Image: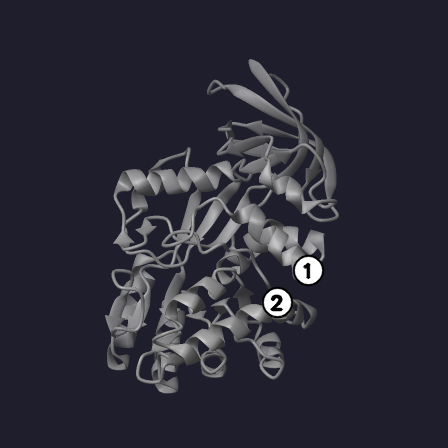
């Protein structure tokens, strides 16, 4: 499509779950609902249009052993784009991916800086590994490097205990979260276990990743404080394999991981029923491949979240939560077009018909 071309998207445009329009126009890379008075070239795309999907837990630039070369990071971002994920919250990466901001053909990224973990209590090569007395300083650093988010590792296996255990004393967590908020950043934390959650929520955290340890007694606290969760169910599916691998050395941890896996759907449905905000994230990068956003939406539906709300968790609601526009008048034209109504069957998300990024048809 030439620089002066106009894109006409017609059929059903899902501006919101109940705001469905017949068409939109893309003029100079931006959305308009007014027919252009003149255009040199018009290209038409037919189908069901959604805002570009959101993967709210992704790791561009991260591999199984830490940071990856730029060409691999580019392939990761392109894979996410081809799946329709046009907005990514990068929930921790040791790589500098600012170069992606200059590429109009790659998804937009909201960065959370590099993971902040306890010494020898996370995957080697991923995080700043520090002690509690240094947490405020590292939060300050990563808040300034990120795009309004900081990522903590809230719990991990304690080899002396042989099971998951919190990473941070309550006082350190409070001070770190307060420092992020002072700088205008929100804080999220990796948490698998139950016993890391209460202190982090009461310390003022904004979001919990995975949240497999969310129990009935903790749900009201999350709901009261408005703390969101990003369940990453496609990642939680790997827990049985992880448990099997650790059985001989850490049988207590392995049994715990299996229990968390077994109740994963009940955990997510309980959170949703209580009004806790739930968003789509895949945990792509590291050990999981990119491009799994459609699979994660389907997992939320399997857990019992209504299809339209599962869609919102990767479109309208997710973009609002992250402070980014959807299919709004004048917004950058980032959208995905499907053959059929994704509200009727979310599985259609796995087969996008057209992908439009910054006003250009890229796939």
Q: Which mark is residue 305?
A: 1
Identify which residue is drawn at 72% across, 57% down. Answer: 306
Q: CA distance from mark 1 to mark 2?
A: 8 Å
Q: Which comes sooner in the sequence, label 1 or label 2?
A: 2
Q: Describe residue 142's horizontal placement relative to residue 318 as left or right.
A: left
Image marks 1 and 2: residues in contact by CB distance under 8 Å: yes
What residue did someone put label 2 on? Answer: 268
Judge whether 172 appears above or below 295 on screen. below
Quarter of the view holding residue 126: bottom left
Identify which residue is drawn at 37% across, 65% down. Answer: 150
Residue lying at the far front of the rendered structure: 248
Q: Dot 1 lies on which element?
A: loop
The colour scheme is: one colour
Residue 276 locus on image (x, y percent):
62, 69
Residue 217 locus on image (x, y percent):
61, 84
Q: Describe residue 144's horizontal placement relative to residue 233 as left or right.
A: left
Quarter of the view holding residue 249: bottom left
Residue 346 locus on image (x, y percent):
67, 46
Q: Dot 2 lies on which element?
A: helix
Residue 196 visible from this viewpoint: yes
Identify which residue is drawn at 52% across, 60% down. Answer: 237
User: Along the line of sight, which residue is nearer the eye, 321 or 48?
Assistant: 48
Q: Residues within 10 Å of mark 1 (few under 14, many from 20)?
A: many
Q: Which mark is residue 147?
A: none
Judge whether 317 appears above or below 360 on screen. below
């Amino acid at each position: 499509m030439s620089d002066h071309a106009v894109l006409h998207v017609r059929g059903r445009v899902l501006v919101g779950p109940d705001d469905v329009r017949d068409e939109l126009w893309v003029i100079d890379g931006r959305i308009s609902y007014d027919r252009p008075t003149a255009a040199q070239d018009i290209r038409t795309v037919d189908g069901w249009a959604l805002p570009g999907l959101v993967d709210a837990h992704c790791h561009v630039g991260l591999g199984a052993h830490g940071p990856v070369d730029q060409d691999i990071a580019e392939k990761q971002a392109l894979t996410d784009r081809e799946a329709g994920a046009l907005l990514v919250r990068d929930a921790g990466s040791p790589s500098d991916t600012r170069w992606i901001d200059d590429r109009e053909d790659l998804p937009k990224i909201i960065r959370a800086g590099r993971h902040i973990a306890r010494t020898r209590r996370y995957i080697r090569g991923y995080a700043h590994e520090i002690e509690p007395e240094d947490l405020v300083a590292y939060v300050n650093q990563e808040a300034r490097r990120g795009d309004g988010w900081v990522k903590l590792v809230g719990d991990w296996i304690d080899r002396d205990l042989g099971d998951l255990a919190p990473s941070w004393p309550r006082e350190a967590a409070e001070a770190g979260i307060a420092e992020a908020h002072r700088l205008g950043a929100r804080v999220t934390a990796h948490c698998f276990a139950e016993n890391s959650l209460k202190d982090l929520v009461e310390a003022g955290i904004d979001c919990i990743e995975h949240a497999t340890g969310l129990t009935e007694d903790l749900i009201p606290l999350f709901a009261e404080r408005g703390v969101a969760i990003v369940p990453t169910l496609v990642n939680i599916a790997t827990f049985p394999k992880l448990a099997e691998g650790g059985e001989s050395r850490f049988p207590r941890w392995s049994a715990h991981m299996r229990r968390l896996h077994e109740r994963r759907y009940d955990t997510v449905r309980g959170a949703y029923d209580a009004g806790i905000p739930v968003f789509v994230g895949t945990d792509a990068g590291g050990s999981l491949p990119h491009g799994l956003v459609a699979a994660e939406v389907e997992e939320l539906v399997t857990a019992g979240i209504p299809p339209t709300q599962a869609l919102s968790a990767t479109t309208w609601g997710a973009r609002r939560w992250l402070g980014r526009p959807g299919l709004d008048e004048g917004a950058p034209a980032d959208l995905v077009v499907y053959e059929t109504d994704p509200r009727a069957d979310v599985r259609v998300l796995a087969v996008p018909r057209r992908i439009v990024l910054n006003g250009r048809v890229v796939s």
